[in-house]
Image (spheres, helix red, strand yellow):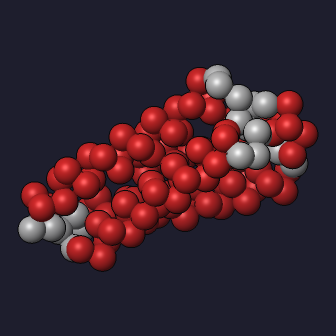
Amino acid sequence: MVGMVAAMNGIQNVFKPAFSRKVYASTEGIRQATPLAARLFGIWNLTSAMLRVYAAYHMSERGAYLMCLGTFVIACLHFVSEMLFFNTLAMVPGSISPIFVASGSIIAMILQYSYYVG
């Protein structure tokens, strides 16, 4: 499900950069959320979506599992650093939800590693 949401978000950001401004909702974030940045964000989302969907169908493969986990770690680090260090994320639902999804996915995947990978 998260892979499909990432794919839809990626397509939205590539074709309609205004979606990025909902995530990077601080004054600084809106200023820096250019159409180019939105397309790059969209391409990242499409890439992570591809990895996540592949992993969903190959959960017992250690490499696929770890690559999927890595996409959530990178996303979480990105959003947290944008909020805490670069001040491009405001404390609004559009900015906080990716942090909750990424951190929740990291926790779930770590807890379920032995079940899927063994």
Residue at image x 71%, y 29%?
A: 90
Outermost right residue = 31
Q: How many marks?
A: 0
Describe residue 77's horizontal placement relative to residue 40 as left or right. left
Question: Which one is nearer the viewer's eye here, 26 or 34?
Answer: 26
* Residue 100 falls in image quadrant: top left
- Answer yes or no: is residue 108 visible: yes
Residue shown at 37%/60% (left/top)? 69
The image quarter in which residue 66 lies: bottom left
Left or right: 9 as drawn, with respect to 99: right
Residue 118 sits above or below residue 92 on the image: below
In this view of the protein, which residue sits in the foreground, 98 or 3? 98
**Relative to 54, residue 96 above or below:** above
Q: Is residue 74 above or below residue 95?
A: below
Residue 54 in view here? no
Farthest front residue in view: 85
Q: Quadrant of the N terminus?
A: top left
Question: 30 and 5: which one is in front?
Answer: 30
Residue 103 appears in which quarter of the rendering? top left
Q: What x and y, as percent, mark residue 86?
A: 76, 46
Q: Position of residue 116 (x, y in %)?
A: 14, 61
Residue drawn at point x = 45 percent, y = 45 percent = 102
Residue at 73% x, 60% y is 40
Please state the horizontal and vertical placement of residue 72, each as a whole percent of the image. Answer: 45, 54
- Residue 117 locus on image (x, y percent): 15, 67
In the image, is 52 to the left or to the right of 27? left
Q: Quadrant of the image for the C terminus?
A: bottom left
